[in-house]
Image (cartoon, rainbow, N blue to C red):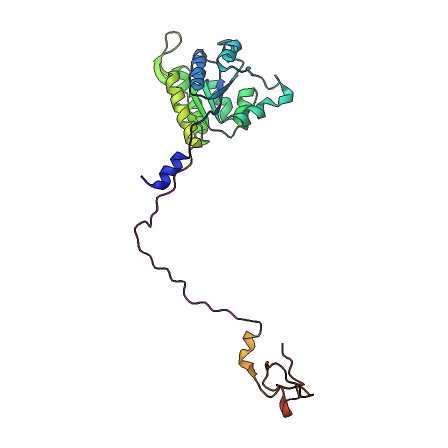
Amino acid sequence: MNPQTTRARDAYAPRARRVVVGVSGSIAAYKAPSIIRLLRAAGHEVRTVPTAAALRFIGAPALAAVTGAPVQSGVFDDAAAVAHVQMGEWAELVLVAPASADLLARAATGRADDLLTATLLTTTAPVVMAPAMHTQMWNHPATRHNVDTLRRRGVTIIDPDAGPLTGTGHGAGRLPEPEQIVARALDVLEAAHTPAAPAPDALAGRHLVVSAGGTREPLDRYATWQPLLRPTGLCDRDRRGRPRRPRHVGVGACRAGGTGRAARTG
């Protein structure tokens, strides 16, 4: 293995991450405590943000018990804390399971009418969604469009399983088992925080010769006048007979015995 690749992998040390678990209104919300329990068993810190509809399927006390943290669901539950911004900034991963058809539609259109959708707008962490709904709703063109929109934005969508649904329904739309959801979410989390391996060296093993070529540059501001200047010994003394430093002077300078009257140049 490339030593640089080995160092990049060694630089990643698994540690506790901060995960926000969003729960939307679906009968599959009963699986949320199991998802949270698995995340905490893996060593991660979890906070839960249920929608109002989700709390009609599962109670806030149950979610608080499995997370070990208070449950917030409304933007105005703690207005002073600005929870919708604080939760999004706190998260290193946002996992929405289950994600109902309504939640997918609101997220795709950028709605922010509750704490969960506002968190989705403020976070810069990776987002994973596990949809759950009846087959007809999952196959509806509007839902398919919303899923495609979210995927184009970088959201990871875990396709639902096929199986028994509520009532007598059977087909695609069943929420995958908690172990599958958590495994996929942790893969996304690890990928987001693993240093990228260096690109392979395309020139490895090759012998190269590099030539810079010649360069030429004027030494001073008189270089362009060099053809018109010449050193002369006629002006090596001033009027009083004192020696002075030889310098370049004009061709016509120092006539008549080197008096130095025309010696200035430049």
Residue 28 drawn above or below residue 126: above
Residue 169 on the magenta span: no
Q: Which residues are magenta?
A: 196-220
Picture coordinates of residue 6, whole percent (x, y): 36, 37
Instruction: List x then y, in percent, for residue 206.
Output: 30, 53
Q: Position of residue 210 (x, y in %)?
A: 37, 60
> Is 200 inside the magenta-drawn segment?
yes
Residue 200, can we see it?
Answer: yes
Q: Nearer the viewer, residue 17 or 236?
A: 236
Decide: is 239 above or below 162.
Answer: below
Question: Which residue is outermost to the bottom?
Answer: 256
Name the residue at 54% across, 74% down.
223
Q: Is residue 46 left or right of residue 222?
A: left
In depth, the one of 138 and 54 nearer the eye is 54
Vertical comparison of 166 with 149: above or below = above
Q: Where residue 153 appears, x then y in whole percent?
A: 46, 31
| Residue 110 shows in the view | no
Q: Residue furthest left?
A: 205
Q: Residue furthest right?
A: 240
Side of 241 relative to 195 (left or right): right
Quadrant for the N terminus in the image: top left
Task: State the predominant SS element of the stretch in magenta.
Answer: loop
**Looking at the image, is 100 positioned above or below residue 167?**
below
Residue beneath the point at 45% across and 16% down: 36
